Image (spheres, rainbow, N blue to C red):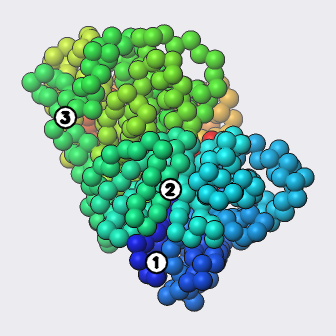
Amino acid sequence: MCGIVACLTKDRDKPTLSIGIDALTRLEYRGYDSAGAAFRTASNTIICKKAIGKILNLQKELEEYDQTALTPLILHTRWATHGTVTTSNAHPLSDCSGNFYIAHNGIVENYTSLKKQLQEEGHVFLSETDTEVIAHLIEKYFINNLEDAVRKALEQVVGTYGIAVISTYEPDKIVAASLSSPLLIGLGEDIIFVASDLSAIAPYIQKVVYLDDREVAVIEPNGYTIIREKKPQEVQWSGSAHDKGNYPHYMLQEIMEQPSTLEETMRGRLDLQEGSAKLGGLISVAVRLSRVNNVQLVGCGTAYHACLFGEYLLEEHACISSKSEVSSEFRYRKRALSKDTALIAVSQSGETADTLAAIKDAVSNNILALGITNSIGSTQTRITDAGVYTRSGTEIGVAATKTFTSQLVSLVLLALLLGRQRKLTLPEGQTIVNELLRIPNLVRHTLLCTDRVLEIAKKYENCENFFFLGRKYNYPIAKEGALKLKEISYVHAEGSYGGELKHGELALVSEHFPSICIVPKDSVYDKMVSNIEEIKTRNGTVIAITTEGNTELKSIADDVIYIPETLEILYPILSIIPLQLFAYHFANLRGCDIDKPRNLAKSVTVE
Ligand code: AGP
Ligand code: GLU
């Protein structure tokens, strides 16, 4: 979703467009619908160019400025929230005079009333966006100092923002500010950046400072000032994360990487002797954790499906009463959380607006807030009390795959730790640890089903509706399998409980509405087989995912995919693999844009 890159060089005459575009392109994977850039010229005027669609279109608009575009330079990728996708709605946006240009991530919730008031005062608006009101407010409050005007403008704004602003009046300055939208300052040798994501600028900088809520930063050629000065942290960056190697799509690469990403999630964390897990990120809250009697898991989309898995797991193996809820519902629900509750927020990006709001709410109520995230230095890591990194490496495909299985394993590690502090016995803990050690190889083995899954995808290529059914630990996997298919192939898919079918959904089942049933040999196997029979009796089509060596389903289901045998709680880590591959092959056969599905963004930083 939306991205900001802005930069200022020490050398005023140095053209910097190519660096800016390169940095913006590194944010491309997050999803956007238009892009723009505003920069200073040698005569200290500002030129602004914008284009809808890919960054490539913007590059065409900028071709003639390659050697003349000077800093400050601000660039933006927009993911429209207010106003259609047009060039005039793309950012940067300016005030009436063209002296102030702003790139904004977020939403100005009170923009209607602000716009009305500004129009009454004579301001003329050129876009339909909410963002444009900030540009006019800055124009209104500017006397002789950009940061003061920005600060006054933001006092009027209700909503969320990460902004970068430049002005012709102070041509050697960028003013940046943030509220519930990530923004950081990156320090390179002779260049300073403002960006919404470290990955955009990491190759160009050595140090980084994250802006906190309501902080305003002033960037000048020789340095930066923030109201609350903070110590820069070292940047750790291995430049290879954005290379998809020989794979046609990042998503396929990320699916295939899972044996090694899971190894990384577990590296140094398994304690066979104690039948437990060592999670360094939770040491600081060890005492509070030992007193926890309730867990509330929150997340969105795929991360929410991990929460659902965590709910079954923590309840059964850590003996802690657990609930999960999507963050956007949780934040507006009137709840009675007892003080012995821990909130566990699961988020790949650590920047999902609704999940961050849920965390803030918990923290303000003195509830222990823990995070599970893949994103080092993300807002989530800074506002939670403690957390666990999933260590999956950068995930570029919008559809989460490797980060999901790492979330599942992280939750198993957490259940081991909490369980061993409670009723999980040593032999039970050791059995789980021993099986976790086998998981990377079992995933490797499961991935061999890719050709079989492709065959099945071809067979059902023309179907427009699918059911995904599972029970207990595999119910979240049914939901996740359906989400994967919806996201990247745009066909209708529903993930449901096997047991719910006969309460209504069965009416939809037909030969052309296949049901993908997750039915490993676990404690609910027989129940799932009965559900499959219910479908077959009504001429429904069934694709079953079951345990190797189980021959029973061959004669009942239309197609069978096999996964290796493991513990009941670990089956989801294996059963999701064929579903990820099914979504991938199915969408690929239908010619969909796999890594950047329509209407979606990698990280959802607006409510
Ligand atoms: C996953 O395939 C989706 N792209 C989406 O549901 C995602 O999981 C959700 O937006 C939450 O993101 P987060 O993990 O970064 O918080
Ligand atoms: N709300 C702004 C708009 O629609 C910003 C969207 C974004 O964050 O990209 O233009």
Under circle 3, the secondary element is loop
Which quarter shows the C terminus? top right
Dot 2 amino acid type: Val
Compare marks 2 and 1 and give the one earlier in the sequence: 1
Position of 338 relative to 207 (above/below): above
Q: How many marks?
A: 3
| Residue position for label 2 | 218
Q: For the point 38% across and 11% down, which residue is it?
A: 293
Under circle 2, the secondary element is strand
- Asked whether residue 466 appears in the rendered view, the answer is no
Residue extending farthest right: 120
Compare marks 2 and 3 and give the one earlier in the sequence: 2
Q: Pinpoint residue 451: horizontal percent, then vertical percent.
A: 36, 61
483 horizontally vs 387: left or right: right
Under circle 1, the secondary element is loop
| Residue position for label 1 | 12
Q: Pinpoint residue 559: horizontal percent, then vertical percent.
A: 44, 49
Alpha carbon distance from label 2 to label 3: 42 Å
Q: Which mark is residue 289?
A: none
Q: Pinpoint residue 429: horizontal percent, then vertical percent.
A: 20, 22
Alpha carbon distance from label 2 to label 1: 17 Å
| Residue position for label 3 | 269
Alpha carbon distance from label 1 to label 3: 50 Å
Residue extending farthest front: 144
Marks 2/3 in contact by CB < 8 Å: the verdict is no
